[in-house]
Image (spheres, helix red, strand yellow):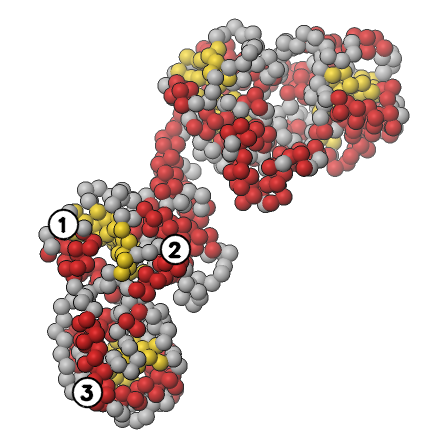
Amino acid sequence: MRVAMVTPMTPESAIADVMCQAIPALNEEWDLDVWCPAEPRYRSSAFPVIPYAAADRETVDALATYDLVVYVLGDSPLHARILPLARTLPGLVVLHDASMTNLVRHTAVETGTLPELVAHVRSTCGPELADLVERPESGAPTRWLEVCAEVPLDTYATENALGAVVHSRWHADRIDGRLLGDVTVAPLPVPSSRLGMDTDEGPDPGGLLADLPDDAVLLVTVGNLNANRHVDVLLRAIATGPGLARVHLWAVGASRPDDAATVNDLAQSLGVAQRFVVTGRVSDASLAEILRRADAGAALRHPVLEGQSASALTTLLAGVPVVVYDEAHYAELPDDVAVKVDPAAGPDGVAAGLLRLVADPAERGAMGERARAYALDSRSGDAYAAALVEAARLALGRRVHAHLAADLAARLLRLGLHDKPVIVERVAEHAFDIYGLA
Amino acid sequence: MKLLVANNVAPFVRGGAELLADRLVLELGKAGHEAELFRLPLGSTPEQIADSMVAAATLDVFNVDRVIGLKFPAYLIPHPDVVIWLIHQFRQAYDPAPVGWPDDPALNPLVEAIRTADRHAFRDATRMYTISPMVADRLRQANGIAATVLMHPPHADQDFRTRPAEDFFVAFGRISDGKRQLLAVKAMRGARPGYRLIVAGAPDSPAVLAEIEREIDENGTSDRVELIPRFIGEDEKLDLVSRSIGSVYLPIDEDSYSYVCYEAAMSNKPTITGADSGGTLTLVDHGRTGLVADPEPEALAACFDELALNRDRAAEMGRNARRLALDLDLSWKRVVTELTR
């Protein structure tokens, strides 16, 4: 079977890293070509890639010659030239994020269709959210995160999909029944230890590690520093939580100066500045070194916008137990590899969770070992590829349904009924009855 | 041409629209065309109505040169050449209550869907005709569409006759709330003695008939109102009207001149109709071809009395009505020419 996988292949794309892990096994199942938006630089890989300049007719026609196209989508502009293809030529869509708001909005701006998108949001979600989608800067950064959760626009990405691959049961439950095809949960591989970062952008991590007191408990939160990483909650937790005086918190990942300044100021005001470091983006080697020294991890996200947490998996694979909020896909982690905290409990709840890890080094170590085993056993490029192959099989079975849906949609469009739920739902009900689609 | 005349169908309901469609197919055939009648079921619940729209929208019509659409949702059938001769819109979606549906969150989405589909179908039609000025006015107001009025001829070549008036009026048509025979029956309470009212037609439901019967019983007008609650054939109908003082026909906002009024006029009989009866006013010119009354029993009783007690005047109105009906020049030849050009 000839399959085209359309994925970003820039060095900056962590998604490309995990997709590439599946390619060797996929190549054994499929006659696979990897397509990617043309970029100045590409991630090094053991297989050739086919760059394309634009999501235009020529690209669609070329992709249409394959038996199946797999579109890899995440909520960033790196996927802006993939989304229009996914909407034009039905295929299997891999959703790395549960919210596609940023990608869809970015694409709408690029294609001059923002007014239509805003009108859609206005009609489905109301004027306040529509105004924010039109002008994100009119709200606080945290408000925009809420908007992304409330208006995920994921169905925009899956509207013509033959099927979808997601990376958690939670995400699957959110979209199942909202697209034509089946939803497959695939075990996202842990990002490789060779993401391609060769340099540290902040202070020398080696020096920082050397400066740590011997009895320090190093708590790391890995990933881009933004308002949704809840570093402020972690700072308040280590500042006030009893028994957490030895805990040092490191935010490991790229950060904008404003965001770093905000959390540094907060650490100062809480009196924990000596126990807090924003490392900035670190090299692959430094990340590995930091994780070797880390005692505990934290992956606090609320609202949850991603379909799975690559940073939490990275931390677990390093043998480091994590504290997470007990919701969304984080709740699916085994109870013996993660400490789950009620997101409503605030810093006190997080402090209590951290205390479990700090107070009992032996149990912490055992949990870390279980975390590593969990990551090794459940995550691999081969396992991910196997799930993609099964999803592709299901997607091909939906092709006839896609033809049916397209035909019915065209007939309704002629009379302007394509966006009238009172009619569309009747058509869907009859189609399900007649063709046994349920 | 191969012509598909598309009408809707509500099982076991047969009225003017059905007769018109049958006759149109016949006349198209006489003119040398191949014509067939296609009837698309239209239910009564919102779900059934939506399903009817879906059926129309998803139909494939083969081996047909032109579709002639008459009623909702049949004119939604996809075809590159659809000529619409609109009998009436689906008035539940356009008119104020009680003819139209009330403002209801459960119904409003369907109303919006019907109006949207109509807008697209009317816009895409090769040509738009309506069967009466009334329907054309409604179309213009509701949809902004200017259609050509192509008044429909009678559905049958009838043996009209005129006989001296006996002491009764006739009220024909399906017995229904919409035709308001009950109003005419109530009017007989206040009418002067000396004449009767004959109500004849198939009841829409047992309930509507029971209400009329109750009215007659409770008000002791059984000697003044005769009920013939069944479908009556052409000959019986024409015989009754030919011997009547005149005809009473009180629909609400009728779409066209109405066969009932036409048959009375061609029988040289005047018609009493309601001021809110719509298209009937095409043939009922107050004081010249009949009387137009407020839809109240007292006003109607006064009209009954006026004609019953002035038979010469009633006869003159009848003759005027016939002349007016003939002046309308209702011919199938013209209809066929327009719909097939």
C-alpha separation, residue under disc 3 versus residue under disc 2: 45 Å
Of the pair A153 and B151, the residue shown nearer to us = B151
Mark identifier at residue B292: none
In contact (CB < 8 Å): disc 1 and disc 3: no
Residue for badge 2: B143
Q: Is residue A102 above or below residue B248?
A: above
Q: Earlier in the sequence, mark 3 or mark 2?
A: 2
Task: Pinpoint residue B51: horizontal percent, then vertical percent.
Answer: 37, 50
Q: Amino acid at mark 3?
A: Ala
Question: Foreground mark, 3 or 2?
Answer: 2
Identify the amino acid type marked 2: Asn
Tag 2 and tag 1 share a subunit: yes
Dot 2: within a 10 Å radius of its alpha carbon, few (fewer than 14), some, or many (20 or more) residues? some
- x, y (%) of residue A48? 48, 8
Q: Position of residue A288 (x, y in %)?
A: 71, 10
For the residue pair B85 and A29, the one nearer the viewer reads as B85
What chain letter is assigned to the residue under label 3? B
Secondary structure beneath label 3: loop
Residue at 83% x, 26% y: name it.
Answer: A265
Please provide percent x and percent y for residue B178: 35, 71
Location of residue B148 with respect to B212 vertically, above or below: above
Left or right: A309, with A220 as reference point = left
Q: Residue furthest bottom?
A: B193
| Image position of B7 with respect to A396: above or below | below
Q: Are marks 1 and 3 on the same chain?
A: yes
Q: Which residue is mark 3?
A: B165
Q: Chain of mark 1?
A: B
Q: Residues within 10 Å of mark 1 (few under 14, many from 20)?
A: some
Q: Residue at x 73, y 34 (%)?
A: A343
User: Mark 2 or 1, which is nearer the eye?
Assistant: 2
Please give left or right for residue B155 compared with residue A81 in the image: left
The dot on residue B34 is: 1
